[in-house]
Amino acid sequence: MADDLDAIRSELDAAAAAADTTAAIEAVRIDFLGRKGRITELLKTLGALAPDARRERGANLNRLKTDVESRLEARRRSLSDQALDQRLGSERFDVTLPTRPESEGRLHPISQTIDEVVAIFGEMGFQVAEGPDIEDDWHNFTALNIPPEHPARQTMDTFYLPGQPGAPKTVLRTHTSPVQVRTMKILKPPIRIIVPGRTFRSDSDATHSPMFHQVEGLLIDETTHFGHLKGCLIDFCRAFFGIDNLPVRFRPSYFPFTEPSAEVDIGCSRKGGELKIGGGDDWLEILGSGMVNPKVLENCGIDSTKYQGFAFGMGLERIAMLKHGIPDLRTFYESDLRWLRHYGFSELSVPSMVLGLEP
């Protein structure tokens, strides 16, 4: 019975040698190992043999089956190598041809704006601080003297996250002010930081987005007063918009975390329905500011009888839209390459030191 297996092996060698394509190799495999292949049919006859003969015959058939598989795979690899050699022999690359043009990447206006703001305040001695996007109720509201009845705490304005019963509420931070709180709890005055980062509020239209960016500033020491706040922000506005004589005014306002508080307006013109930053007979509000409320200092463990300081905050998208003439906030997040090629920037200067303030 071994003779018939030797005959099959010889036939396999001849069939594999004659196969000159992968399709032909597959046809040989099916002929020998397919559902109705010759070896498969022989395996079906094992049940009619005596136990000893079945054991010997089965071992021989399994060896033959393994041999067939390895020989066909070797032939398949040989054909593949031959095809590759033919392709390498026929194809040529002209290394003198110019490279294919590649599209030039652009820096997003938000990234550029953050870099510019960091650079300007960096010249004033401010250091960048960062904190978590998910905050607890105390850091986001209570420590900042925001009362329970304040509209900002309502679900229509704030994204509350599901939590365990009895555990502190957590939110997607509505401003970057919690980083100021974390800084004051960790560092001793003097403190001088700016905090750029993502913030989240339940709002969406041409001038609002559920996710947007803010930058806030905080300065705490023993001698800082409102005049320093005014000088700092006037210098910033004029440097950012590139207008040396940009009119800047401070208008009384109210924020729970500062006292006194002020909105900061810059001069502009709206003639002919076109907004122009600079000289003119109109004003445009761009940020809020004020002296840090003593209650906030005390909440953070700072002696309000010894230390004082100022804080400010602004929307990065807002000042970017004003500076670069971008009419709709929603376009910042549409991932439109045409928009990015138009409004994007080709260079980026890296900010210096960054403080990480994790929970």
Image: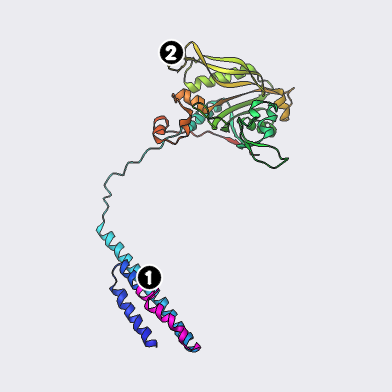
How far apart in space, not on screen, are marks 1 and 2 (Cα)? 80 Å
Badge 1: few (under 14), some or many (20 or more) residues near its Cα, within 10 Å? some
Amino acid beneath label 1? Glu
Q: What secondary structure is the stretch in magenta mostly built from?
A: helix
Q: Which mark is residue 73?
A: 1
Instruction: Relative to 2, say whether 90 is above or below.
Output: above
Horizontal and vertical percent for residue 129?
A: 60, 33
Residue visible at 67% across and 27% down in the picture: 190
Amino acid beneath label 2? Lys
User: Quarter of the image containing the N terminus?
Assistant: bottom left
Residue visible at 43% across and 80% down in the picture: 44
Instruction: Relative to 285, say whether 202 is above or below.
Output: below
Q: The residue tagged with tag 2: helix, strand or loop?
A: helix
Front residue of 338/123: it is: 338
**Residue 23 relative to residue 249: left or right:** left
Horizontal and vertical percent for residue 82?
A: 30, 66
**Residue 246 relative to residue 5: left or right:** right
Residue 106 falls in which quadrant of the image? top left
Residue 178 falls in which quadrant of the image? top right
Horizontal and vertical percent for residue 330?
A: 48, 30
Badge 2: few (under 14), some or many (20 or more) residues near its Cα, within 10 Å? few
In the rendered image, residue 130 lying in the magenta stretch gets the answer: no
Q: Which mark is residue 271?
A: 2
In this rendering, the count of numbered labels is 2
User: Quarter of the image containing the C terminus?
Assistant: top right
Which range is magenta? 30-51
Q: Residue 297 carries which label?
A: none
